Amino acid sequence: RLATTQHEDDTISFFIDCNNAGASFTHAVADGVTISDIIKPVYVPTIIHSFFPLNGLANFEGTRNPVLGMQVTDLADGIFIGCTINHVVVDGTSFWHFLNSWSEISKGSIHLSKPPVFQRWFPDYTDIPIRIPRSAVKLKQSNEELESILPGLKERVFHFSKENIAKLKAKANTEMGTNISSLQALLSHIWRSVIRNKRFDSNEETTYRVVVGFRPRLPELPDNYFGNAILGVFVTMKANELLEQGTGNAAWTMNRKIATVTEESSKMFFKSWTASPKFVTMSSFRSNDPGQAKKFEGKTTLFCGAEEGSIDIEVCLFPETMEALAIDEEFMDVVTL
């Protein structure tokens, strides 16, 4: 769990107490549920959520709940292993680092190929521990707010092959004459497709929140740094600009925004945040399309595909938008079914 220290100046510090208390482990049984029941449906079946422990908890609830939970669910013809980690503790990079390391250990490996680096790093000007004003800590998020975001949403996983991603990249770079990455081209394609099928007013602003990693930008952080080292940046365009000026322009706008996250700007962010802490809540995403494990409309989650160079993207949308997306020829032309 996340431990806390109460300071005399009405501030709080959070830390992990490494006391060998262990992690939460659950063994469950899903009678009659088969592997095909999970992977065959077009939409992600809702029963999936019951296969993950600590489901529905907010990050701040790590003060009274485990920060790591594992669940093994017996299916009729296999097992499902679900893992939940508090996002305050790790980001996606460290999450997969943990799972891959666990896999190595399970295969009998004595020495990990990528040993995690647990040593914390803080800029020289940081007072340790970081003190957060009690008034800034949002201790409870109302059930009404959460429930207003969750009902009625559909989740679907779209598969993009290495070849189709290369086509999107080539198209974006041909349109702009620039060097846009494959991922930026793919994300821009998703962004434009969702907004096109939501039928935004032409002058309405739409925002895509992109998660940017600090590891390649900060020499002090090794690739194996185990923790949370990400920042969300917001890319904003008017709907007509996004849709009429092509994937290349959207990807280039995203590229330029990501480029603003440098070593200098990252350290300035740390300095300003420790001086005046701000927290992200679910309501922060209500007007953002699409964007990170509560679900909200427009949320997109990326996974490495089964084939090398391929990407699976889970998209979370209201049914009418999801149905329109599924018959959008421009979008589905690069989706592998």
Image: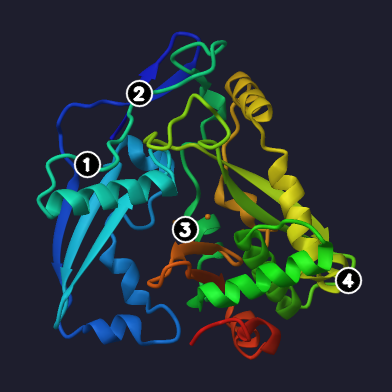
Which quarter of the figure has residue 103?
bottom left
Q: Position of residue 34 (x, y in %)?
A: 21, 84
Give the CA distance from mark 1 to mark 4.
Answer: 52 Å
Does the rendering let one see residue 103? yes
Query: Residue at left 56%, top 46%?
Result: 281
The tag earlier along the polypeptide, 1 or 3, is 1
* Local crowd size for mark 4, using a 10 Å CA cut-off: few (<14), some (14–19), many (≥20): few
Q: Which mark is residue 202?
A: 4
Q: Nearer the viewer, mark 3 or mark 4?
A: 4
> For the residue marked with disc 2, what is the amino acid?
Gln
Q: Which mark is residue 294?
A: 3
Q: Which mark is residue 112?
A: 1
> For the residue marked with disc 4, what is the amino acid?
Ser
- Whether 95 is drawn above or below 189: the answer is above
Q: Position of residue 291 (x, y in %)?
A: 61, 58
Give the CA distance from mark 2 to mark 1.
Answer: 17 Å
Which quarter of the figure has residue 37?
bottom left
Left or right of residue 195: residue 219:
left
> Which type of secondary structure does the marked residue at label 4 adopt?
loop
Q: Which mark is residue 119?
A: 2
* Local crowd size for mark 3, using a 10 Å CA cut-off: few (<14), some (14–19), many (≥20): few
* Local crowd size for mark 2, using a 10 Å CA cut-off: few (<14), some (14–19), many (≥20): few
Query: Residue at left 75%, top 64%?
Result: 173
Q: Position of residue 83 (x, y in %)?
A: 28, 56
